[in-house]
Image: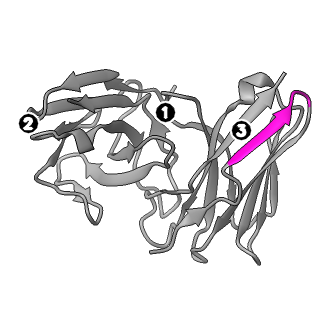
Amino acid sequence: GESVGLHLPTLSVQEGDNSIINCAYSNSASDYFIWYKQESGKGPQFIIDIRSNMDKRQGQRVTVLLNKTVKHLSLQIAATQPGDSAVYFCAENDSGGSNYKLTFGKGTLLTVNP
Amino acid sequence: GAVVSQHPSRVICKSGTSVKIECRSLDFQATTMFWYRQFPKQSLMLMATSNEGSKATYEQGVEKDKFLINHASLTLSTLTVTSAHPEDSSFYICSATTGASGGLYNEQFFGPGTRLTVL
């Protein structure tokens, strides 16, 4: 079946730097994408989402970019802080199929060095 | 708002026993709840979709007789791992959504997870 994957399993950055986490998806019918943050031993925490009719969406210190041509999604974190250390997952939804189901990517472990 | 709880947070059981995990939506009614399983250093894998008052829909490869799901009310879904074995040891996470709305995606609110260890 189709799946969502990630280019980088780990990312280590210095505190204050910007972080970029990438995600490649394969289901061309996906029209809604979400980034989640998961700290060790906890459930996923919603960060930001984007619909397929948008290329970019900004939140507080985070930006999501969507390139539908190459089916690529990225999460940019500005001024990364130690509290940002976690595993980040992208997830996709095809509302034309089941409008509930999410497919998660493999995850990227972000480590922020003080 | 939109808080989802799970109980217990951790459970250790002997092989062959059954374990029940509860998922509750604390401040909203959840028409649909989802159960995920996450092995160490891996992603979340959807096990089943649970709709209040109806039978759960299981993903391919998930044994419905082993993972019993009951969604008896709009605020509670339970997952029972029957005859648990060490390979069932995992992190089980539930999520809840308020339900369908014209085909638009409804945000899933995730619980904190339950760590199951089968000895």
In magenta, the rendered stretch is A10-16
Q: CA distance from mark 2 to mark 1?
A: 27 Å
* Residue at (22, 39) in percent of width and height: B86
Q: How many marks?
A: 3
- Tag 1: amino acid: Gly
Name the spot of residue A58 as percent of width and height, x first. 82, 46
Report the front residue among B104 and B111: B111
Mark nearer the N terminus (3 vs 1): 1
Q: Are marks 3 and 1 on the same chain?
A: yes
Contact (Cβ within 8 Å) of mark 2 with mark 1: no
Q: Is residue B68 magenta?
A: no
From the top left corner, tell me how far across and down residue A79 is, in percent: 89, 32
Please report contact status of discs 3 and 2: CB closer than 8 Å, yes or no. Answer: no
Tell me whether marks 2 and 1 sit on the same chain. no
Q: Which mark is residue A43?
A: 1
Image point 58% across, 30% down: which residue? A39
Quarter where residue A24 is shown: bottom right
Q: Which mark is residue A100?
A: none
Q: Main secondary structure of the magenta part?
A: strand
